[in-house]
Every structure is written in structure tokens, then in C-alpha cells.
Image (cartoon, grey):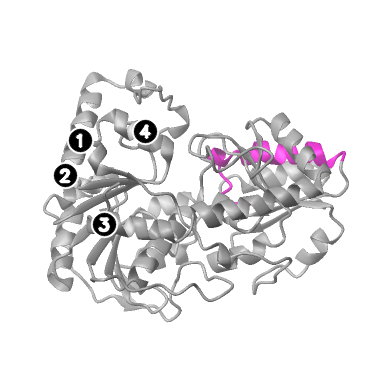
Amino acid sequence: MTIELSEPRRVHEPISAPRPTRTPAPVDRAPSSLRILEVCNDFPPTVGGSETHNASEVEFLRRRGHQVCVVVPRAPEAMRSAGYDESTIRRACEPAWSWSVDGSVPVYNIRETGRSTVGPLYRMWRRLSRRYGPFDVVVVHRAHHVPAFFRASRLVLTLHYMEMVCPMTFIDYQACGLEPSGRCACYATRSRWRNAKWHARQRITRRLVDAVVTKYPHIHEKLLHSGVPADKLHRVPNWIDAGGFGGRRVRWPSMPDDLPAFGRDASCVFGYLGRLSPDKSTVAMLDAFLRVARNLDGARLLIVGDGEERAALERMTAASGLTDRVRFIGSIARRDVPAALSFFDCGLKVSAYDNFSWSLLELMAAGLPVIATAEPGTDGLMVDGETAFLCDPSPTSIAAAMERAFQQPELRRRVGDQARRTIERDYSQRNLLRYEAVLTGDNGS
């Protein structure tokens, strides 16, 4: 396969990281500029927490004066299955285009076909190195892409999932049963030959990378148990600009005209932000709300997002006879998220499997109390009655937490205020500076 590099197309309306409601805090330029290649599967124009995380990371590095180039392996069929329209898929899969607030970041796409992308990524890296000069550091967001960059000067793996711990992470994440030792029960479901190949790939990955970064404490511990050397492993918590969130009932350009009226007479508007998919437990969430709404006239539910479960959720709502109490507004632009959250009184994050998402940080940064399941990784971030209302992922437990939050508005206010303070203290831009230090090799922790 021969990869020809076309000139990056400057988009007329650059896709940018979430636009804050105020001017971002100034960022000092780094003492020296690095040439950085970021290889990530999730990047605008698709919408989601991972895209926002990766976009904000790239934008910060650009503002620090680094020269950043992005490569995105895309699978058009997977995008169609996720519900993206053809115009978004065409835009996302353009061979080359420019991104960022000033359009200065070149983005190159590689089509994923189900076969290994190691060869195409290696050839892309060589061609980009000739065009933009040798890269000082390559940042990879998927472990199976690491071998493509075996000749990189410095190679950093940023892990968002447990793919170096569990061989089933991207096959059947919900079925994984991790033991305290770091070994997962999924090995028993696979042949010895498949397990041997998987372990061989992990050994190669551990040998090739100069650093492994994760934002989750439970994944950090599992990686240590799985054999990643402690001197290569770094835990850098996530980051978000809380100053971009705040206010009440803030309008945005594409907002439905009747949305203000929806919550005007409500005592509490529960809100969900995210994909409508099985792993987010959205059916259990709606089931819980419908139980509560029958007894609490002032309860409303506002759902922001789209996905494969939307039709089923709308049918559930229609069958309940409570369509006037539930509102679906679909997907919105990332820059409009802070305004949409200003219509929430209490957030909902009740996934049974993956609850430490970017949208959780957004809800807390907006000063909202959150009804959430206590899943691995959220220890210390969400404390029941202090920064969240905790429950288990069953409809009965979620409904009980909703009733508790509904009936105690003063507690909701205190929990929301403390949630925002926690974000400002522990999830600020300082974490981006720590991340940058790992990229440069200056981080000793």
C-alpha cells in the first residue's frame, strides 16, 4: 500500500476544541518547541468525550508553541454503525485537512479496514517525518499501533482503556472480570495460542514505549501488575477548564425555541449528556426517571446526545404517557455544551462499566450535583453526599438517588458547589503541564 500525502486542506470554519464561554486563560510558551506526532482514533469532527479530550490536548500543546501533527485511523463502516451521517463521515475521512482555532494543525486520516494498520501507519510516519522534519516524540493512543513507530526517537503510549490488561477490551468490555492481581478472567475464554499471541504483543509494546500514561488510578495499578515497569508508568489525571462553564439558562444558537418553557415549572431538571448506547445504561436511567416522575410532578428529564438506543428510549417514553416530562434534543456542537448544561439541575452518569467520562467532568465543572454509579477510577472524585449522589446501576437504586436529590434542593446546591471546587483543584490545566513533562522526558514521577 502506497500512501500519497496531499496538502492539508484549510477548513473554512475550523473545527476547534470546545469553545469556552470566556477567553481561555493565557498559556506561557514552552522553553523549547517540540515536533509532536499524535496518533489517535477519536478526533473531531466526530463528537464524544475522547474526541474532546484529544482535541484539548492538541490545542494546549499548540498554544505552548509545539508543532503538532495528527494522524487519525478511521473506520467509515464503524462510524455509520454509530449513527454518523454521510457528510460527517466524508469530512472526517478526508485524506488531509487543517484543524485548530487558527487552522495550523495538519490532520491526516488512514482508513481502517479491519486489517492491521501497523504497515500503513509506519509508512505514513516516514512520509510525515520527511515533510515536517523528524518528530521529537510520537504519542499513540492505542497499544496495537505502537509497533508502527519502533524507530521513533521517543514513544509515549496514552491509555484510555485497559487494553494492555484485558485482551477483550475492544471486543466485549462488559464481560471482563478483572481480579485484584491484575489478571482478568477473559483468558479462560480464549485458546492458549490466542493468549500467547496477545502476551507477545504486550511484551513488544512494553519494550518499545518510553512512557505509558493513564489518567485512571485503577488502570495504573492494573498496568503495574501486568508488567509495565514502574519507571515508565505515569498517572496524569484528566483536565478541564472549569471557567468555561457556569450560568443559568444560557441560550445557544441551535437551541430549541421551547426549551426554556420545558423547565420553567420544574422543581428539578435531571439531565443526561452523552451517547445513547447500552454501555451507558440509558435504558435503566430512563426507567428510573419514569418511576420517579409518576410520583413527583416537578421532575423533568432532559437528554442531550444521540445513539443507537434513542428510538427505544423514545418508545419507552411514549408508552409511559409522560412525553411532556422527557425531552430529547439530540447531539449538539461541543462549543454549546456549557450552555446546554445550564438547563440542568442535576446530572446523571449511571453506566455500569465506564463512568469516568469527559462528560462527568463537564457536569461537575458546571457546578452540578451528579447521580452516579461508584465505578473503578472514580474513588476520591465522587463522594456520596459531598460531590455526588451515589447509587448502583439498577433502576431501583437510581430512582432512589433521584428522589433523594429532588427532595433536598439545598443539598443539591452544596454538592454541586463542592463538585466544581474539586474539579478546579484536582483537574485543572496544571495536569496538562504534567502531561507535557512526560512527553519531553522531564517528568520524574
Magenta region: 272-295
Identity, as a three-letter code, of the amino acid under mark 3: Leu
Identity, as a three-letter code, of the amino acid under mark 1: Arg
Find residue 208 and name its label.
2
Identity, as a three-letter code, of the amino acid under mark 4: Glu
Residue 156: give x, y in percent of width and height.
Answer: 25, 51
Quadrant of the rendered image containing residue 220: top left
Identity, as a three-letter code, of the amino acid under mark 2: Leu
Residue 416: give x, y in percent of width and height.
Answer: 68, 51
Residue 49: give x, y in percent of width and height.
Answer: 49, 54
| In the image: residue 135, left or right of residue 438 | left
The residue beneath circle 3 is: 439
Q: Earlier in the sequence, mark 1 or mark 2?
A: 1
Separation of residues labelled 2 and 3 (CA atoms): 15 Å
Separation of residues labelled 4 and 3 (CA atoms): 21 Å
Q: Which of marks 1 and 4 is nearer the N terminus?
A: 1
Picture layout, residue 313 above or below residue 89: above
